[in-house]
Amino acid sequence: MVSGTTALDEEGKVVGKDDMYSQTVVIIKKIEAALGQLGATLSDVVRTRVYARDISRWREIARAHREFFGAVKPTSTLVEVQKLIEPEALVEIEAEAIIETRVQGFMQWLEQRSVVPLIRHLHTQADALRRVELERAQKMLARGAAAMIGHE
């Protein structure tokens, strides 16, 4: 998750004063850079939350959002707020991404610690026990059927 992103430059000054579209572009580029550090891209984003100081200007935000996320179309929420952390900030965006490589990395981490092989071994043992129980049940049924036939 990339949270609380505003259009601040390296010096802490708002970029695109009074320009909601420009601020949105700067914010999405910052989100893209943050995701890149994790090996992800904007195509991994599944949800955005946009906080705007003036919801009547939603088209400016939507235009920038569409330019970057048009092919992805993540779920998006737009909320009007009275103020943001910086008085000149007009937009703040949060983004959530699902990063497949992180899942793969977690699985590798588990493999390295022998957790996954242990789980596989336990599944194999459980399957073997089920087979033994099934065979035992089949033998009991066969004995019961034989006894019933012998008593008739």
Image (cartoon, grey):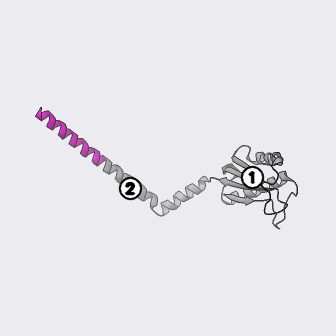
Disc ID at residue 50: 1
- Across and down, in percent, residue 68 comes to 76, 48
- Of all residues, the one furthest to the right in this rendering is 18
In the picture as drawn, the residue positioned furthest to the front comes out as 82
Q: What percent of the width, then of the height, locates residue 126?
A: 35, 52
Q: Which mark is drawn over residue 12? A: none
In this figure, which residue is indicated by the disc labeled 2?
A: 122
From which residue to which does the magenta span run?
A: 131-152
Q: Residue at left 32%, top 48%?
A: 130
Left or right, 117 with respect to 53, comes to: left
In front of the other: 116 or 20: 20
Q: Main secondary structure of the magenta part?
A: helix
* Relative to 102, 79 lies left or right: right
Q: Residue at x 75, y 59 (%)?
A: 5
For the point 49% across and 63% down, the residue is 112
Q: Position of residue 10 (x, y in %)?
A: 81, 66
Tell me where residue 4 sits by quadrant: bottom right
Q: Quadrant of the N terminus?
A: bottom right
Q: Residues within 10 Å of mark 2 (few under 14, many from 20)?
A: few
Q: Is residue 32 visible?
A: no
The C terminus sits in image quarter: top left
The residue positioned 42% from the left and 56% from the top of the image is 119
Query: For residue 8, which quarter of the picture?
Result: bottom right
Tell me the kind of residue under disc 2.
Leu
The reply to whether the magenta stretch includes residue 138 is yes
